[in-house]
Image (cartoon, rainbow, N blue to C red):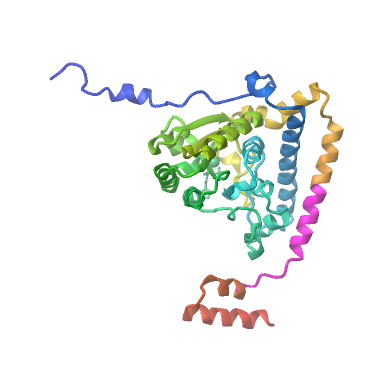
Amino acid sequence: MANKPIVDFEAIKNNLSNVSKPIQVLNENAEVTDQDIFDSFSDDDLVEFMKKMVWERALHEQTMNFSRQGRMGFYAPTEGEEASEMGTVLAMKKNDYLLPAYRDVPQLIQHGATITEAYLWSRGHVLGNKFKARSMMPQIIIGAAYDEAAGVGLGIKKNGEKDALAFTYTGDGGTSQGDSYEGMNFAGAFKAPVLFIVQNNGFAISTPRAKQTAAPTLAQKAVASGIPSVQVDGMDILACYAVAKAARDYIVAGNGPVMIETLTYRYGAHSSAGDDPKRYRTKAEEQPWFDKDPLIRLRKILEDKKLWSEDQEDKLVDEYKASFKEAIKEADSAPEDKVSDMLKRTFEIPTPEMKKEIAKFEAKESK
Ligand SMILES: Cc1ncc(C[n+]2csc(CCOP(=O)(O)OP(=O)(O)O)c2C)c(N)n1
Ligand SMILES: [Mg+2]
């Protein structure tokens, strides 16, 4: 027998990570770390990025208020993930198809759904499932949007659509779910035009990233599907946008799918249903992420350039919040979605059991 191990598995294990350093343009001290990418943005672009992040944070705050007032159904907080969400969606075109997960409602609205539709979706109303935008409704089954995206991507290819792709999101937890690999594998094998985004916000509800998977990065989970992947500073909207745009260009040129892992953080609870982050993480763990806040770093750059002020931001927030209040009023005035209607929509021909249920609910509803 040889003295040396036949295979040095430990050495292989220590060298598993084949993903390069996360791409960043602006660090948490608002210092430019990639001048070339930074210079590719005009002042107007920078202001636009800031406005979108302020919009998303205002949406979060106002929607949480609605939720506390009992006016929402399911809502997944997005505070902290503004750069990751706005940066990626703004690099897409209206012709692209969005397959969102439940935390991707802000992207859904940016992609063309109305806020009213998004609120109706939250309430489980049927009108919250009929977007004019090229999008499916947000997926609750984690990882499943990756499979939908692979199918939509293949459809785009078969239809010969040239300047279009399917883009989709999952979380760190979603990458531990078989569906996400199956979707990537299918898209890789068929060279389907799909952009897979993983928003790694550190937690799947209360389970930290390190307990879900031993993979050194989540980006490398694409490698086994033959898909190039990259990590990006998910608290830096300039990096998120630049990388998503580069990925889009590469995909629509006919090169097949790409996966992006954004390194971000969910500041609050998993959902408005009321889990308590204090039970699974400490203030000391949270603080370094709050210090990386995506709005703070871009705000500083803009203020230095005299392109932004507190006053201007306050006015925008008021304006945005007024639009959310309008939207919820409109959602309140949507026709009532009856249980009997929901049952009738389930199958084209109801089962005998469902027929009985429909009759039972119709009797109740007519009282
Ligand atoms: C297939 C499946 N299993 C379990 C759940 C319950 N569940 C809802 S959200 C969630 C955690 C998902 O975490 P992650 O993918 O990191 O996304 P995040 O909520 O952090 O955005 C789980 C386990 C689910 N919705 N679907
Ligand atoms: Mg997560």
Q: Quadrant of the C terminus?
A: bottom right
Q: Is residue 224 above or below residue 131?
A: above
Q: Main secondary structure of the magenta part?
A: helix
Q: Is residue 311 above or below residue 151?
A: above
Q: Is residue 141 above or below residue 176?
A: below
- Of residues 277 and 4, the one nearer the viewer is 4
Position of 84 compared to 150: left or right?
right
Residue 309, visible in the rendered structure: yes
Q: Is residue 338 magenta?
A: yes
| Picture mark count | 0
Q: x, y percentage for residue 265?
A: 60, 35
Q: x, y percentage for residue 81?
A: 63, 38
Position of 361 compared to 70: left or right?
left
Q: Residue at x 35, y 26 (%)?
A: 13
Q: x, y percentage for residue 162?
A: 55, 45
Position of 137 compared to 182: left or right?
right
Q: Is residue 185 above or below residue 241?
A: below
Q: Quadrant of the N terminus?
A: top left
Residue 283, visible in the rendered structure: no
Give the residues drawn in magenta, as a range: 321-339
Quarter assignment of residue 80: top right
User: Residue lying furthest left in this view?
Assistant: 1
Q: Residue at x 42, y 26 (%)?
A: 17
Quarter assignment of residue 51: top right
Q: x, y percentage for residue 316?
A: 82, 40
